[in-house]
Amino acid sequence: MADKSFPNPHEIEAIPGTEGWERMYPYHYFFSTKDKEREAYENNTFWFNDALHYPEPLYPFDIIWDEAWFLGLSQFNTRIFMIPPVYGVDHRIINGNVYISPVPITDPEEVQKRIPLFMERAGYYYENWDRLHEQWEKKMTGIISDIENLEVKQLPAMEDISVVKNGIGTSSGYELLKTYDKLIDRGIRCWQYHFEFLNLGYASYVTFVDFCTKAFPDIPLQKITQMVAGIDVILYKPDDELRKLAKLAVEFDLGSHIGDDTKNVEDVIAALQSSENGKKWITAWEKAKYPWFNISTGTGWYHQDISWNDNLNIPMSSIRIYIKKIIGGHNIDRPMDQIKEERKRLVHEYRGFLKTDEDRQTFDQLHGTAELVFPYVENHMFYVEHWFHSVFWNKMREIAAIMTDHKFLNEPEDIWMMSRSEIKEALWDLVTAWATGTKGYGPLHWPEEIAWRKGVYQKFKEHPPIPAVGTPPDVIAEPFTIVLWGVTNESMTAWTKLRKIGDPDKVNEIEGFAGSPGVVEGIARVCRSVEDIGQLKENEILVAPTTSPSWAPVFQKIKGVVTDVGGIMCHAAIVCREYGMPAVVGTGQATTIIKSGMKIKLNGDTGRIYIER
Amino acid sequence: MEKRHDYVLWFEECNLESIPIVGGKNASLGELLSAEIPVPPGFALTTKAYKRFLEQGGIKKEIFKILEDIKPNDMDSGEIASKKIRAVIENTPIDENLQDYMGEFYRQLSKKCHVPAVPVAVRSSATAEDLPGASFAGQQDTFLWIRGIDDVFTHVKKCWSSLFAARAIYYRTKMGFPHDKVEISVGVQKMANAWVAGVMFTLNPASGDRASVAIDANWGFGESVVSGECTPDNFIVNKISNEIIKKTISHKTFLYTRNPEKHCIIKQDVPAERQDTQCVVDLDVIELAKIGKKIETHYGKAMDIEWAIDKDTPGKAKIMILQSRPETVWSDKKVTPVMSKRSSALEHICAGLVAGRKVSN
């Protein structure tokens, strides 16, 4: 461990000009020397920056999901399934960036005591997976429809007469508070469900990975994933809908109506109204929207990750790419049969190379379970991070609009600079003033505070986070830590290396995970969000913070992908493997170092990227 | 009516059924070809050709007369007889018809290989390897880098005459095996003119991973790799997906090649510009691995293979398999289960969680 030293978390200093930043986040997220025991615990623990979920510093409001999974993941490990050797994942924040750490159980007796409990509880879930999962889907769609139906109502100067005649007994002020509470409650609840299956899913997957790497020391992680990955994955449905719409447009010969990216979506719809086929196409387009256009253009974790519904030009632009491909004589269908066949072959052949009957039995047991649970691991994201979040952010915007009307905010988007409890307090301020017929205090406080916070946030953004702090451990048992964040000896070494590089213009080589094999050379195009994909030219290499299913059409155009964030299981890696296109993912900083137009060579076998300077 | 089929056969025309007339070695080359395993091209002279040579040359009687002079238990008389017989065989011209067949095949082989008077290996292929005291093979000769039809004739005759090497005569006499019953076939095969060569294991010898193919390669002939003298380029290919999963390009300082005048193997420096260059391109690495997998399937076990990429075929790399034998190190190891047996996946998951994952090496 000598080469992997990370700073003491208590010695990190605030960025000049941000002093007092702590008040933007929950008080229990800070490293503290106030108490010796807590200080020692924090010092002896390894905290790594959760760049996977947060490629950028956290907005005070957006930390809601961090708090939600802090609770959700941890409770299922610690209190519900009684994962034997590990409790939850602890969280801290430094300069707006989240650091996390799994909490091991160090007392061997305690571990032993938890084993039978885990067997009973996890066993029940594995055995009743399908039934419980079906129930899960109902719960999820239930809370999604709850918030879809949630009405955020203006505060009237006078309540409607019906309040009197129906003896309602409550006011719109109270309703606003209730609506906000309900919105937040559903958000937290949604994240409770998020982990109901996920911990067990990852535990099963990690065990299968362990077996495969022991039996086949050379096996690429991608192959293991391919053996269990779902094929008809919900996350791909939104893109499938666009492919269908593109085909329909070609069939109806609507290309000229749809036009190119200079044509706004409203004009396209207006143009299509002029013909019967155009109208039919619009019906199909409208039908595809629910629920599939709730897909986020990012990971869905951030309020700025807008959905297709929020900007219909995005899916329209993707449809145009597909139309062009079809007209060019290309098949735009995902090679489903081929993927299925390949997966079957992989399982069959790897199994065939095992040497004993015992091994084949273990392989079948572990593969069977991993295959059963894996679709959940892939699919839950559509329900939570995409569908639920997309609806949620917009409901929050409606609340922000009311706060703006009452001068609590200069503009609705300022709301993200407030924490959820501050908003609650401000809403009290707002409704009591409304009820009382006075002026609230909010307008005197929040606009000024938010202006300061924006400055702090900007400074956070300009200072890339330290990859990790504290003391690295010898053993990690927490399934998420391994699968999602890929915390391994190699990654820890890579993080220390990153710290040593000062000037991004001097870096000629970047390392990441080998996401999809192959070597390719070409011109880089940095796209910070899906809205930039219009700049991509044929056969360029996409360099992006991360990709999500709404980026799917660009994979038709490019010849390689580099991302800042993500492991072997990230969207870019999965799609590139499908297309047989090289990808290097989880580089940490490719979008900082690589500039559009640079010539780069990426090696998807070794996970290295070379920059020609 | 005699036909050329009676005397000369392309390797492609040989299979296990033709062992009696082309011998084991030539037959197995035919078998490999039919399994789509590329071996250097060539042809076999059948045992009939040998018999015809003895008859047409009128030397059969002479030979058997010399043999009669051998006194059992007198090694010297055997030596003398051997020398005499071998001289008779090697000095007798091959009859014209046979010369025509061989000449035509050699010409066609040269044409096929895009090399005028292509250098070949001439080696005997025994038909009676199951004879008692059988190691005839060891007593028969292989001649490398033979070039031109006259030299081919000369060395074919040397192969034929090797049947009468002193030790072979001694064995047969001792075992009471009639000298007129032994027959011999000869193979004439293109010399692999290796641009790059090396060895390949159909498992990873470092990790034992059966799903991998490991390839070591250097410029020139395979000798530098086989002998372990050089640090070769190393490739690990996933056998199932045919993807290169690991690639190590080494600093390669020397190679073996052929001295064009003397046809002997010489050691040379690798030109500076090629020392750090990957010596087999990815496509060929993958092609090699595919062939390795075919050979493994053919023999039903992990194999240790010598290969070369021939430089004579213009336009594209021509991979040739020179030798293959079963891998022994991993294949002979005692097999232990990967994980101890448990009654359910859940038991495995629990045990795995408790063990955790070591992050430090």
Image: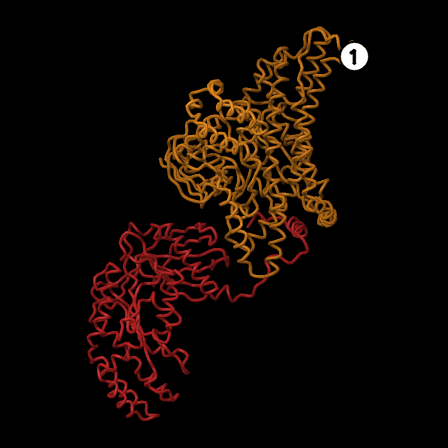
Q: Is residue B215 left or right of residue A131?
A: left
| Rendered location of residue B86, percent (x, y) | 25, 82
| Rendered location of residue A255, percent (x, y) | 42, 26
From the image, tell me which residue sits under label 1: A166
Mark 1 is on which residue type?
Asn
Tag count in the figure? 1
In the image, the chain rendered in orange is A
Count residues near mark 1 (Cα–Cα under 10 Å), then give few for <14, some for 14-19, many for 20+: few
Quarter residue A438 falls in = top right
Q: Is residue B15 left or right of residue A305?
A: left
- Is residue A548 in view? no
| Residue in the image at 35% along x and 76% along y | B126
Tell me which chain the residue with mark 1 is part of: A
- Is residue B192 in view? yes
Q: Is residue B292 above or below residue A528?
A: below
| Rendered location of residue A367, percent (x, y) | 60, 50
| Residue in the image at 19% along x and 75% along y | B96
Q: Is residue B151 above or below residue B64?
A: above
Q: Nearer the viewer, residue B332 or A78?
A: B332
In the image, the chain rendered in red is B
Q: Nearer the viewer, residue B73 or A470?
A: B73
Q: Is residue A130 left or right of residue B157?
A: right
| Rendered location of residue B60, percent (x, y) | 26, 85
Q: Nearer the viewer, residue B135 or A259?
A: A259
Q: Is residue B281 above or below residue A255?
A: below
Say which element carries label 1.
Answer: loop
**Model colouring:** by chain
Quarter residue B232 falls in = bottom left
The image quadrant where one finds the C terminus of chain A is top left
Q: Is residue B192 left or right of residue B345?
A: left
